[in-house]
Image: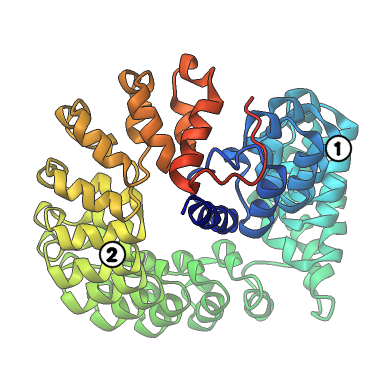
Amino acid sequence: MKFSRQQFGKKKWLENREMKYETFFPVEFMNDKEFVLNHIKKYGYGLQFASKSLKEDRDLVLTVVQHCGYELEFASNKFFNDQQVALTAIKHYPYALTYISDDLRNDKEFMLEAVRQNGRAILHATNTLKVEIASIAVKQNDEVLVYLEESYLKAHTELIFDIIKQNRKAFRWIPNDLLKDHVFISKALALIFPEIEKIDSFDYSKKDIMLKVVQEFGFLLEFASDELKNDRDIVSNSVRNLAFSLQFASPDLKNDREIALIAVVQDGYALQYISSELQRDKIVVLSAVNQNGHALQYASDDLKNDKKIVLSAVKKSGCALRYASDELKSDREVVLAAIQENSWALQFANDEMKSCEEIVMKAIKEQKGTIQFASKTLLSDKQFLIEALKLGCDNVLDYAPTEFIEDKEFILQTIKYQNVGAVRFCHYCRNKEVILEAVKHNGFALWYASEELQKDPELVVQERIEQCYYGSYVGVYNHD
């Protein structure tokens, strides 16, 4: 009988090694280098759940950041000053620069190499180095122009011209002051449109040239003459290229239904730039929210209370519920549609909907964190909290009444559902009964145990092995 149970335990152990863990690694796997690496390769995360010794293992960390540069955040701090590890992470994840030491970020040679590997790395360079290494960065990523000081760009216009030759799309990132400079804009556009005659004497009031230019750079409508801002051909072509250019059109053309539809079908947010009259137009608003649900915020109050429009908005973007009328925030069909698209939309429902267990559970099932939006009535219901735990919502105690947290029997009951939240509270981290019970169900609970209990880790591990794997243990656990 014991042999059979141990065989079952061995099978369970092997099956557990292949599982996906979202919030912890069982204590028996925390220091298992092969397990941790395989989990990260397979699921893209996990170093934060590994043991301290593995986070300090250079070979492991170097291998991990080759696959997932963002995992550098969870490595030992000593690697934040390790050039090879940092560059390996930056190659695939430029934001890894936010984790490295100031010494490296101020090291010119290091930052040059970082930018060679990933142009966007310049975003995290110090202001001084940002200017020095700009010429390298822009060759790899034209958007880098956005992150350079305008004063630098104005003093280095030849650099901008070189960039435009490489990629004309970089033109959109040129500072406005330069776009207003007649000499600069004429030379820049001549590089982009060599086929247009007399463009070297460019003027924003010339319709024939502007008609060609706005078809590729609609945002230049901002600098057009008032006459051209009221020209239907110019404005419609600008809007077809860039919906937001509608903001620069004349009041008359902002009230042009056809132009408004061209804009909002391309980008629903353009609804904010049309006339108040068209913001009351059901067809225009419906077209906008079908493109982007959040465009609902720019609709008239009457249309924010139109169920058809609001339903269309929340089905596209659940959190657009925040812009609906109070009446529709209490409409069951609307709220359900919203949380089906995005569970976080629950926060914008009215109190009545937040007290509906069915609706709240539906949200929690998709996003555990939405429990924070449940009503106080539900959060004061022990059975509701238990049901939430069954769905994997392991932070229920963060929102439970104090008397629940002080109820040891209730705490032990929550632990059965792999909830380690209870042991985070200091009066439980020293309670051996609670800690051992927690570890049986979730090895991550060991992190919250008091220093005294952590001094005898084998006892804790053995308890989990006996309860979870019936004494069958495949491997060696070394606690740090």
Q: Residue at x 49, y 67 (%)?
A: 244
Quote the CA–CA distance across marks 2 and 1: 44 Å
Q: Would you say 206 lies left or right of 246 here? A: right
Between residues 346 and 414, which one lies in front from this camera angle? 414
Quadrant housing residue 152: top right
Q: Which residue is mark 2?
A: 339
Say what amino acid the circle numbered 1 marks.
Answer: Gln
Query: Measured from the top left, where is residue 284 in percent x and y?
Result: 31, 80
Number of marks in picture = 2
Quadrant housing residue 402: top left
Answer yes or no: is residue 156 visible.
Answer: no
Mark closer to the chain start, 2 or 1: 1
Q: Would you say 165 lies left or right of 341 here? A: right
Q: Residue at x 74, y 53 (%)?
A: 67
Query: Measured from the top left, where is residue 262 in percent x and y?
Result: 45, 82
Say what amino acid the circle numbered 2 marks.
Answer: Ile
- Mark 1 surroundings: few (<14), some (14-19) or many (≥20) residues within 10 A: few
Residue 84, label in figure: 1
For label 2, the SS is helix
